[in-house]
Amino acid sequence: MPEKLNEQDKRLLDALQANCRLSNQELAERAGMSASACWRRVKALEEAGLITQYAALLDVEKAGLGFQAIVHVSLTRHDHRHVDTFIAETRRRPEVLDCYSTTGEADYHLRVVCRDLAAYNRFLEDFLFRLPGIANVRTNLVLKDIKKNSPVPVQVKSG
């Protein structure tokens, strides 16, 4: 991976983030490069780990998941076994779309989707409250999506 991304890389990455289903030829045209150079560059960005995956983003409500919450979780103490268990178990749960370890009042912030309030209650009772080391769980309901799935702003280094 080069130490800096150039303007072609920025156009290429912006185009991929907007629509990863573009053909290599369409992508090359948007980035202002040949198709073969574009293919090589995309492969290099993938191998360097800058491009981590390609995905289809779904509308959660149309997928039958009308309940969304931001869940703030605090652990009783930072015993590595509790932390490791929490992280491993959280990664396994399909309801948890995102999980962040943070500073501040809560140790972790999760974005959780469920079919409805009853399903969320089962998630809490049957999963989250049963994990060792959970001290506090606070839920904020998502009322409306304002901004999500935003592309990463690609930074081009000059010089």
Image: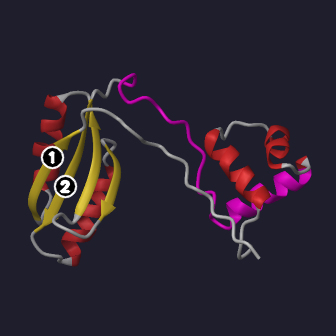
Q: Is residue 53 above or below residue 56?
A: below
Would you call the spot at circle 1 few (<14 residues within 10 Å), some (14-19), or many (20 or more)? some
Q: Find disc 2 in the rendering and name its residue.
A: 72
Residue 146's place in the image compared with 38, above or below, is above
Q: Quadrant of residue 56?
A: top right
Mark 2 belongs to which amino acid? His
Image quarter where the N terminus lies is bottom right
Closest to the observer, 129 or 117: 117
Q: Is residue 10 magenta?
A: no
In the picture provided, is 3 more to the left or to the right than 57? right
Name the one closer to the observer, 159 or 128: 159
Residue 54: where, in percent of width, then height?
A: 60, 46
Report the residue at 65% width, 38% height from top: 19
Q: Which mark is residue 139?
A: 1
The residues colored magenta run 36-63
Residue at 12% from the left image edge and 37% from the top image edge: 121
Please give left or right for residue 77 compared with residue 146 in the image. left
Q: Position of residue 152 (x, y in %)?
A: 55, 54
* Nearest the eye: 10 or 79: 10
Q: Is residue 16 above or below residue 155?
A: above
Task: Look at 89% across and 47% down and name the residue there.
Answer: 35
Circles 1 and 2 in contact, beta carbons < 8 Å: yes
